[in-house]
Amino acid sequence: MPLTLAQASTIVDVALKKGRDSKFQPLTVAVLDAGGHLVAFKREDKSGILRFDIAYGKAWGALGMGFGSRTLAERAASTPQFFTMLAAASGGRIIANAGGILIRDAAGDVIGAVGISGDTADNDEICGIAGVEAAGLKADQGGAKK
């Protein structure tokens, strides 16, 4: 079953609420479907102008590589030459930093990804996981492609 607008909206709204409740810096949240198309997006007041590109790049990179951007960051650290080439191949769209989370349905199939930017990568990821779980879906911030 594909990611719905209602699910994507829940992910965004809950992620932002988690950020506010936790007193994190202003966040930007982008939710993409399995094809990499933007489904839902919100940018909080005072969130920097590059935050959309970073949030989108975290989600897009997770989809493109088949694992969360935390794992992408770990792999980039161990194989920097590959990630230099990956950045070139992707037109610079991939952001290798935690905060890009695959969204899986009940069967474990990838149906999209959420990317968040604005606070530390760990805090961005916390908010994304909260949003995905509130939508009744599975958050996959690491691991390999199933």
Image: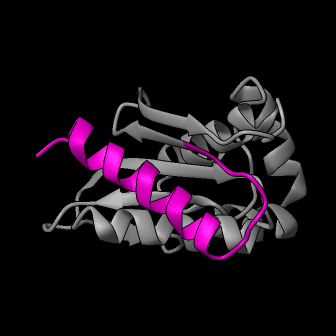
Quarter of the figure with the C terminus: bottom left
Residue 143 vs residue 37, the one in the foreground: 37
Horizontally, residue 108 falls left or right of residue 95, namely left
Examine the rendered structure and indicate whether residue 122 appears above or below residue 54: below
**x, y percent for residue 38:** 44, 28
Residue 101 vs residue 78, the one in the foreground: 101
**Residue 60 sits in quarter:** top right
- Magenta residues? 1-29
**x, y percent for residue 28:** 65, 44
Residue at 80 percent of width and 67 percent of height: 120
Instruction: Give the colouring mode of the picture.
Output: one colour
- Assess whether residue 48 is covered by the magenta stretch: no
Residue 91 vs residue 97, the one in the foreground: 97
**Residue 93 sits in quarter:** top right
Horizontally, residue 105 falls left or right of residue 36, namely left
**x, y percent for residue 91:** 74, 23
Question: Is residue 145 in view from this perspective?
Answer: no
Residue at 33 percent of width and 45 percent of height: 8
Residue at 80 percent of width and 48 percent of height: 83
Residue at 53 percent of width and 73 percent of height: 142
Task: Please give the count of numbered marks on the rendered protein.
Answer: 0
**x, y percent for residue 18:** 54, 69
Residue 7 vs residue 88, the one in the foreground: 7
Horizontally, residue 121 falls left or right of residue 7, namely right
Horizontally, residue 30 falls left or right of residue 57, namely left
Examine the rendered structure and indicate whether residue 32 appears above or below residue 80: above
Question: Is residue 50 in view from this perspective?
Answer: yes
